[in-house]
Image: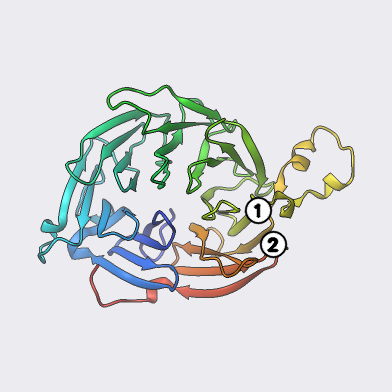
Amino acid sequence: MAQQRGVNSLRFNQDHSCFCCAMETGVRIYNVEPLMEKGHLDHDQVGSVGHVEMLHRSNLLAIVGGGSHPKFSEISVLVWDDAREGKDSQEKLVLDFTFTKPVLAVRMRHDKIIIVLCHRIYVYTFPDNPSKLFEFDTRENPKGLCDLCPSVEKQLVVFPGHKCGSLQLVDLSNTKPGTSSAPFTVNAHQSEIACVALNQQGSVVASASKKGTLIRLFDTQTKEKLVELRRGTDPATLYCINFSHESSFLCASSDKGTVHIFALKDTKLNRRSALARVGKVGPVIGQYVDSQWSLASFTVPAECACICAFGKNMSKNVNSVIAICVDGTFHKYVFTPDGNCNREAFDVYLDICDDDDF
């Protein structure tokens, strides 16, 4: 993520009720609704941080060093337990996973931690006495793309497959430790994968390629393509894709500075290309006709990386989307099924301070 105001990366927790900032000055944790700082780790405790991952709303954080003045290495994942007594930061560092290459992402669920390197993904039991369950070789994955289903029922993980544009899905509950599972591959795109997300239930996977014009959704059981959503016609870099809690909607952010909202449950709500209403069209523009355009959209500062997710339901017909940007801004928009979209809140989260440590 492009760094502004000292923010190196941003992540929501598993149910999108909190977000964490890996910063030049340490780590900050925020509650989303209402927006407030839950706590922070300062530079003296953790140095500058490249990545941070929360486990729900618990006292555990996974930290990877990065930025200009790191205290910890970029090849290590350190797990910080804030419930540990003692002022000394060393006492709160309860686990350490060290590798030979930089760690690009960390994903956690209540019983597992996944660590992503450029060509390999490691899965460990977690948090008590971690042991390595699996390692998967991947295609070059410089963005550390990976998503993990938080559901208790489904232990699904998705990451880029070996073939360009493919996704690999692994059900960790069906895979015997120490074995490489039969790859469950979805050929999602023709160019490299740039963004990937699972819904909360683990039943649907969404992905976009480096081209960034289309988001494709697949059933994780059957591998069948469910729908194709069109972000736009110009290439763009997608930063984030997220599903609403019950998978009725999907939101996506890109470097165009627009957050798009699509309907999934009732796809008739999505806009269709004007050409689709013309009748028979040639094969060249057929692809524009088949895909669905967003139901609603709103803008955030362009060229500014941001993550987006759905807020709490306002009422039956009013939903909200939250966008958190690396420039320190917080945006909340409400939208209705007819595509009406209005700003509900704007704030500068970096200016909201809390005197408590994490």
Q: Is residue 315 left or right of residue 113?
A: right
**In the foreground, 154 or 279:** 154
Query: Which quadrant holds residue 354?
Result: bottom left
Q: Earlier in the sequence, mark 1 or mark 2?
A: 1
Q: How many numbered discs?
A: 2
Find residue 183 and name its label.
none
- Specify whether residue 68 is in view: no
Give percent across and percent down for residue 125.
Answer: 25, 39
**In the foreground, 242 or 67:** 242
C-alpha separation, residue under disc 1 versus residue under disc 2: 8 Å
Crowding at dot 1, Cα within 10 Å, few <14 / some 14-19 / many 20+, comes out as: many
Is 205 situated above or below 304?
above
Going by the numbered disc 2, the residue's amino acid type is Pro
SS state under label 2: loop
Find residue 337 and name its label.
2
Quickly name the residue at label 1: 263
Is 54 situated above or below 123?
below
Q: Residue at x 37, y 33 (%)?
A: 172
Q: In this view, does 69 lie to the left or right of 212?
A: left
Give percent across and percent down for residue 86.
Answer: 9, 65
Query: Which quadrant holds residue 60?
Result: bottom left
Crowding at dot 2, Cα within 10 Å, few <14 / some 14-19 / many 20+, comes out as: some
Q: In which quarter of the image is the C terminus?
A: bottom left
- Marks 1 and 2: CB-CB under 8 Å? yes
